[in-house]
Image (tube, coloured by chain):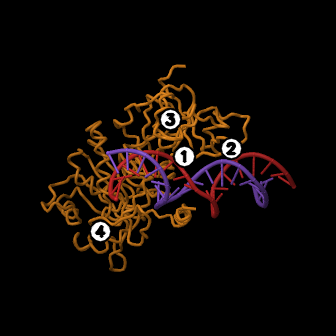
Chain colours: A orange, B purple, C red
Amino acid sequence: MARKSSIKNLKNARRAKNDEFYTQYGDIQKEIEKYLEYNPDTFRNKVVYCNCDDPFESNFFRYFVLNFNKLGLKQLITTSCKPSPVANTQLELFGNGKTLSKSKGRPKITANKFTINEVFDIDADGEFNLKDVAKQLKANKNNEWVPLEGDGDFRSDECISLLEQSDIVVTNPPFSLFREYVKQLFDHKKRFLIIGNINCITYKEVFQKIKSNEIWLGNGMGRWISGFIVPESYDLYGTEARIDENGNRIVATNNCLWLTNLDHGRRHQPMPLMTMAENLKYSKHKEIKGKRSYDKYDNYDAIEVPFTDAIPGDYKGVMGVPVTFLDKYNPEQFEILGNSNVRGEREHLMNKKKSATDCTYINGIPQYARILIKNKKVKK
DNA sequence: GAGCGGGATCCAAGCCTTCG
DNA sequence: CGAAGGCTTGGATCCCGCTC
């Protein structure tokens, strides 16, 4: 099979739990600009907390420092999930490692906390680097760098205490702890903008929140996030990996998305839709085009819509659509009824005569996860 | 309430197709 | 022909419900 190698990767990834993917500056900027377009005050007077970000490497930290005044931030807090290997070599910039705890006379490298309350002009070299960070820290007593007591795990007491102080959390959390991470955000009723894998949509906890419009997708998925920077140790292979002009090792996974509860304009734009008849005649998808009608599921009273842009604008019943539909989802236009792959979210839609329960079926052939939706605008 | 069996869930990084 | 769009993939582990 052509996909054999990807299955191998899948299994390796499952074992390795590789969480060291760094988000690129341009991708962060591109996404946040969209919230500002919708509401320029989205971040004004807010405390932003990046709780999975080594300040020495994180572009989230870099973005929020460089745009601190433009966004009108009240404060930026950044904590790393683990001790930074980079910090080790950069201590002299901060003067004798003064803020580091000492152990047997030698500085003990720990996880870091950076707090930025005020940002002055960055030196005019056009680059933002560790020197600039150091300058910010030295320039103002309100800005500080201190070691954390523990390892900087977002679940630790000290990080939860920082979470309590913050208004908006923005980061790319470790995927292997994603569900726990989201739960914590909701437990503490925080606003957030985070990166997740497309399949997180089908996590039970996440899907329930999407259905109830407590979580929604950001401004794009897939290639909207152009890629992630991976460490040296990461093996680059396949057609989507590259090294950029700065020597960064990039993998374009094309399977990630922004997840948020900050409002933005895209989710209020209605999807343009063709009628069923038009789709059957003009659709660019051969699975639809030329057919007499849309397929019906064996085990659901709903029609199969294999591509998001083949959703008809004149069907009043239940439609099964790919999870990528959520990228275009407008809650004023559509209602989400369930998800064929989430237990507890599908039983009410199933045709009880059929036995297969794990997904939607057409003529006995299983389909991938489908979100079951209804068009709110079509009258009964 | 421990043990067991089998179906449900879940993992991440591509690959294939179409477009311009 | 490069860029962008669209959505898999299948086995290890989890978890639920049943039996003893």
Q: Residue furthest front?
A: A290
Q: Where is residue A158? Give x, y as percent.
A: 41, 57
Distance from disc 3 to disc 1, alpha carbons, whole Å, reads: 14 Å
Label 4 secondary element: loop
Subunit that carries the residue with mark 3: A
Subunit that carries the residue with mark 1: A
Residue A364: assigned label: 2
Q: A57 and A275: which one is in front?
A: A275
- Judged by depth in the image, the label closer to the viewer, 3 or 1, is 1
Residue A247: assigned label: 4
- Judged by depth in the image, the label closer to the viewer, 4 or 1, is 4
Q: C9 and A123: which one is in front?
A: C9
Earlier in the chain: of badge 2 and badge 4, it is 4
Asked whether disc 3 touches disc 1, contact meaning CB atoms under 8 Å apart, the reply is: no
Q: Are marks 4 and 1 on the same chain?
A: yes
Distance from disc 2 to disc 3, alpha carbons, whole Å, reads: 31 Å
Q: Amino acid at mark 3?
A: Ser
Label 3 secondary element: loop
Asked whether disc 2 touches disc 4, contact meaning CB atoms under 8 Å apart, the reply is: no
Crowding at label 4, few (<14), some or many (≥20) Cα neighbours within 10 Å?
A: few
Distance from disc 2 to disc 4, alpha carbons, whole Å, reads: 49 Å
Subunit that carries the residue with mark 2: A
Distance from disc 4 to disc 1, alpha carbons, whole Å, reads: 35 Å
**On the image, numbered disc 3 is attached to which residue?**
A212
Q: Quadrant of residue A356?
A: top right
Q: Amino acid at mark 1?
A: Thr
Quadrant where the image shows the C terminus of chain A? top right
Quadrant where the image shows the N terminus of chain A? bottom right
Q: Amino acid at mark 4?
A: Gly
Label 2 secondary element: loop
Q: Are marks 2 and 4 on the same chain?
A: yes
**On the image, numbered disc 1 is attached to which residue?**
A202
